Amino acid sequence: MTGRKKESVRREPAVTRQMPESYYILGMLLLADGKRADARKAYEAFLAQVSDGVWAQRARDTLATLN
């Protein structure tokens, strides 16, 4: 995903409210880019909307590695 696409995901609150998984995906992309602090924020935003399920557990597991 290009930088422009990542930025559009961050700036589109309607998208992230309707599709909270976009925060999870953004977190993965940011982490792959080495932007750990930004990835943490994205995963935390995801967990603020989705607290149960496999993806929530994966987000929590990833956050634990970012400490």
Image (spheres, helix red, strand yellow):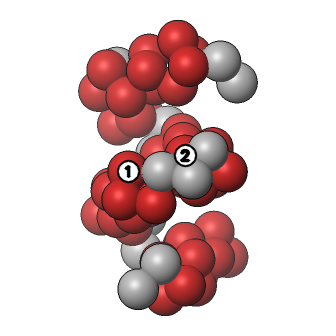
Seen as rendered, the residue at the extreme front is 34
In-image side of 26 versus 10 (left or right) = right
The C terminus - image quarter: bottom left
- The three-letter amino acid code for the residue at tag 2 is Leu
- First along the sequence among labels 2 and 1: 2
Question: Picture coordinates of residue 2 (x, y %)?
Answer: 65, 18
Left or right: 43 with respect to 27? left
Q: CA distance from mark 2 to mark 1?
A: 7 Å
Q: Residue at x 57, y 77 (%)?
A: 62
The N terminus sits in image quarter: top right
Amino acid at pointer 1:
Asp
**Residue at 61 percent of width and 45 percent of height:** 33
Question: x%, y% of residue 39?
Answer: 46, 55
Mark 1 surroundings within 10 Å by alpha-carbon count, few (fewer than 14), some (14 through 19), many (20 or more): some
Label 2 environment density (alpha carbons within 10 Å; few <14, some 14–19, many ≥20) = many
Asked whether the beta carbons under mark 2 and mark 1 sit within 8 Å of each other, the answer is: yes
Report which residue position mark 1 lands on: 38
Q: Is residue 46 visible?
A: no
Dividing the picture into quadrants, the one containing residue 5 is top right
Residue nearer the viewer, 33 or 27: 33
Q: Please tell me whether mark 2 sits on a helix, a strand or a loop.
A: helix
Q: Position of residue 48 (x, y in %)?
A: 30, 63
Residue drawn 42% across the image and 74% down it: 51
Residue 36: image x %, image y %? Answer: 46, 60
Query: Residue at the spot x=36%, y=59% of the render?
Result: 37
* Residue at numbered disc 2: 30
Residue 38 to residue 15: above or below: below
